[in-house]
Image (cartoon, coloured by chain):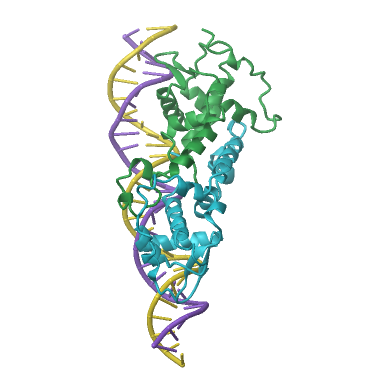
Chain colours: A green, B cyan, C yellow, D purple
Amino acid sequence: MLRLSKLTDYAVVVLIRLAELAPSESCAVQTSPGIATATGVPEPTVAKVLKALSAADLVLSQRGARGGYRLNRTLNDISVADVITAIDGPIALTACVDGATGSCEVQGLCAVKGRWDLVNEAIQGALSGISLAQMRAASVPFAFRVPDPLPALSTFPAE
Amino acid sequence: MLRLSKLTDYAVVVLIRLAELAPSESCAVQTSPGIATATGVPEPTVAKVLKALSAADLVLSQRGARGGYRLNRTLNDISVADVITAIDGPIALTACVDGATGSCEVQGLCAVKGRWDLVNEAIQGALSGISLAQMRAASVPFAFRVPDPLPALSTFPAE
DNA sequence: CCCTAACCGGACCCCAATGGTCCTGTTTGA
DNA sequence: TCAAACAGGACCATTGGGGTCCGGTTAGGG
């Protein structure tokens, strides 16, 4: 089904959430328990997602008491490809690419040798062209949109 | 990893193989055992793939003795999206789309409501734009192309 | 007329990867 | 000094895909 991991879905939710109320001041870090209660995603899962996002430098972490997470870039500068790469690893459709030491030994017969590269690039391109800001905008009509102005989001790394 | 099923990979191999030596006359059907030995893919798997492709009308089947499969369209008219849809079902990245009766119950909080649609469409577009003919062309230089005319395999009763 | 080759459409099992949880550090503000 | 929160693991359960097999049906050939 060409499905992508549910964790990635959560990551998008978390990132958007992170942008939703980080507007005021950049120091307004959010804790993973807080995000968990806000989004309904179980806390350990949120923590796991945030760790991965932090490792990919999509979010910044503040350790210790009063710690938390905050976005490292605006939603405009985060593409879907970035998120997928952060959570699921590099975008590669086939096992033929990496672990080629599998069944493709019979490369004289296996005719797909590297053919999926074309497809991989196409998908990479398609995914890189969509930002989280676009995803947020493309959501439910706007009848559901939180009434807050949310322009202040970009006023982020004010520091 | 956004990976697509290995079956789809096999399907591409099988389809290209089907095109390799069906050129002469359209009646030159190939049997799944024959394709299996030619491609190195286990026979039951080839059969399974061909069944799915047949159900999707990508190939035509001829039952009975001297039966087999042959392409229903040229490789130019078969997109990667067609193959993926035939094997893995409709292209939809998230479980949120179909089985929405899952964890997304809290749609007031779950902020991704239908946002992946944008991504799905982008991927659909990217995949629809690549034909199997392109994939075949994009293969290894041609220095690796099997030198044999590969007709020998088709030596099944030339009838 | 029967037999065999091949497709058809299931059911079936095994395994790996994912989703999800938890526990033990380590950091840091109050 | 303590508590809150991140870091980085290890750890299980489950799902779905990969792969196999079997009975049934069709149709050409002896």
Left or right, C5 with reference to A19: left
Residue sitting nearer the eye, B150 or C29: B150
Residue B106 at x, y percent in the picture: 59, 35
- The quadrant in which residue A49 appears is top left
Left or right, B93 with reference to B148: right
Query: Is residue B67 depicted above or below A19 in this figure?
Result: below
Residue sitting nearer the eye, B5 or D3: B5
Judged from this view, the residue extending furthest toward the right is: A143
Residue sitting nearer the eye, B137 or A51: B137
Query: Is residue B4 depicted above or below D24 in this figure?
Result: above
Residue at (52% x, 12% y) in the render: A157
Query: Is residue A62 depicted above or below D26 in this figure?
Result: above
Task: Count up the numbered dots.
Answer: 0
Residue B29 at x, y percent in the picture: 47, 68
Residue sitting nearer the eye, A2 or A144: A2
Residue A110 at x, y percent in the picture: 36, 52
Left or right, D15 with reference to B76: left
Residue A34 at x, y percent in the picture: 50, 22
- The quadrant in which residue D6 appears is top left
Residue at (45% x, 75% y) in the render: B66
